[in-house]
Amino acid sequence: MAFSVALLDEANHGGLDAARVTDLCAAAFAARGFDVERLGELSVALVEPETIHELNRKFRGVDRPTDVLSFEVDGPSGEMVGEIVIAPDCASPELGVEELVVHGALHLSGMDHGDEFEDSEMAQLQATVMESARGREG
């Protein structure tokens, strides 16, 4: 069975479909050296700001909305990799929802950026993945 990502659009964003989300996540994991065909299940949920605010408060102790959260379940080699939760209304115009999908997938692949994302290895890889992904649109 080929790798695929389940997409739940609770925010009625409408700007993504499951095939595109699967391509973006596959590209992020492949860039990290993972065999995409051996990855477990992954889901992406697009939610309202109130929902991500509550998740951010509950799981990170940060009492404000954010744009993306990643929740690892079993990790990349497990049955259920994890879930990426995105609030499209909180996405910055510079990143956009597609790039937040890649960002979340890179977190699930084991990357972190600390407090200084712009100068991180993760930021560089995210830009590379997005550049490649934009070339595969359409």
Image (cartoon, helix red, strand yellow):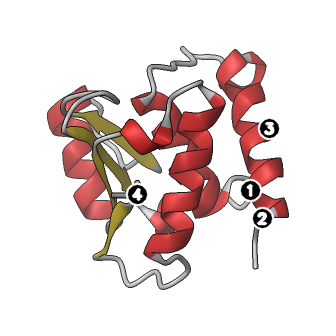
Give the residue at mark 3: 128
Give the residue at mark 2: 136
Residue 93 location, quadrant:
bottom right
Determine the residue located farthest toward the front in the rendered image: 1
> Label 3, label 4: how many angstroms apart (C-alpha)?
24 Å
Q: Quadrant of the C terminus?
A: bottom right
Element type at marker 3? helix
Residue 91 visible (yes or no): no
Q: Label 1 near label 2: C-beta < 8 Å?
A: yes
Residue 21 visible (yes or no): yes
x and y percent of residue 60 in the render?
Answer: 25, 28
> Label 2, label 3: how many angstroms apart (C-alpha)?
13 Å
Q: Quadrant of the N terminus?
A: bottom left
Determine the residue located farthest toward the left in the rendered image: 58
Q: Residue 88 got which mark?
A: none
**Between tags 4 and 2, which lies in front?**
4
How dense is the environment of label 3, judged by Cα within 10 Å: few (below 14), some, or many (20 and up)?
Answer: some
**Between tags 1 and 4, which lies in front?**
4
x and y percent of residue 116 in the render?
Answer: 65, 17
> Label 1, label 4: how many angstroms apart (C-alpha)?
19 Å
Rendered position, 1 above or below 62: below
Left or right relative to 61: residue 115: right
Q: Amino acid at mark 4?
A: Ala
Q: Nearer the viewer, residue 111 or 62?
A: 111
How dense is the environment of label 2, judged by Cα within 10 Å: few (below 14), some, or many (20 and up)?
Answer: few
> Label 1, label 3: how many angstroms apart (C-alpha)?
9 Å
Q: Nearer the viewer, residue 113 or 54?
A: 113
Tell me which numbered mark, 2 or 3, is placed earlier along the sequence. Answer: 3
x and y percent of residue 71 in the render?
Answer: 27, 37
Element type at marker 1? helix
Q: Amino acid at mark 2?
A: Arg
